[in-house]
Amino acid sequence: MEEVRETSAWVARNSSHVTIDSSGLEKVVETMKESIPKVEWDYEGIHYFDNGPLTVQYLFVLDALNFCFWPDKDLNYDHLAKGLKEALLNDHSAFDADRLQKYTGPQLRELLKWPRSLPLEEERVRLLHEVGFELERSFEGKASKLVESCGKSAVKLVALVTRHFPGFRDHSMYKGHQVFLYKRAQIFAADLWGAFKGQGYGEFNDIGSITMFADYIVPAVLQQLGVLKYSSTLANAIQASSEIGAGTEEEVELRACSIFAVEKMRELLSIKCGKQVGWNSLNMLVC
């Protein structure tokens, strides 16, 4: 995770389109320091949970598909999580490794009970195939075996996921430098920790190493809070709902500067509160 922190800091120092407003960051920290919430993972509503290996399989499939709900204004993460939960409740073999390798776009839609094509549907199907194939090849078809092999280390789990599953290798080239973000691989570790309440499959001795999860929602919240400032060109593009392509300078800056800003908020809050502030509380506050 130090690669994520270091490369995100490099982007923040060299950013052309996104800047971090130190005074805005300080104001947000002052507001937050008296009300840092205790975050609980929700499995009674939208998530599947049975306290066993099937939950791990569910979370890995969920996090493989957890990206890009834009521009379908009716689709969001809750639809994905709940749809996969209901599919698993109806058929406990729905996420078996051999079946993951065979899903088609229409079958995925049917699984989720979604009436039209999903954003980046072909890529989502490709990722299901990749997950099923590599789980079968290297982990006896079970995401729980993947987790067991990490030795209770969230950092090692992220490394294993990104090594074995190319679809989780969330990194980009930016001004000649490689930048590591690893959003969904980190979310998988965090979801396990939250779902299992730090026990069993969710027990990690270094969970504090996880950074915030750099998506396209957090930058919008940080901008509204006065932490991030955009160039006029970027602001106009966002206002016009124009697509900001993956891997572009603007996209990398939005995500990397968000990580750097939240890390700075975490540091300041820890100083002001006299105790370590977890990534999970900050993620809840900015999401």
Image (cartoon, rainbow, N blue to C red):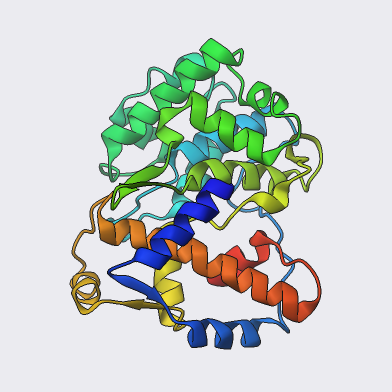
- Residue 255 placement: quadrant: bottom left
Q: Residue at x 50, y 32 (%)?
A: 162
In front: 32, or 88?
32
The answer to whether residue 46 is above or below residue 125 is below
79 or 260: which is nearer to us? 260
Residue 58 in the image, given as x and y percentages of width and height: 58, 34
Is 5 drawn above or below residue 271 in the view shown? above
Q: Does residue 5 appear anywhere in the picture? A: yes
Residue 193 placed where, x, y %?
71, 46
Please report the residue visible at 58 percent of the width from the left and 49 percent of the height from the top: 2
Percent of width and height locating residue 71: 26, 57
Using the rendered view, name the quadrant where residue 55 is placed: top right
For residue 44, above or below residue 85: below
Look at 46% across and 79% down and name the residue there.
227
Is residue 217 visible in the rendered structure shown here? Answer: no
| Front residue (pair 9, 111) | 9
- Count of numbered marks: 0
Residue at the image point whose x is 66% and y is 60% from the top: 280
Q: Position of residue 230 (x, y in %)?
A: 31, 76
Answer left or right for 66 relative to 244: right
- The answer to whether 8 appears left or right of 115 in the picture is right
Corner quadrant of residue 253: bottom left
Which residue is more in the foreground, 267 or 146? Answer: 267
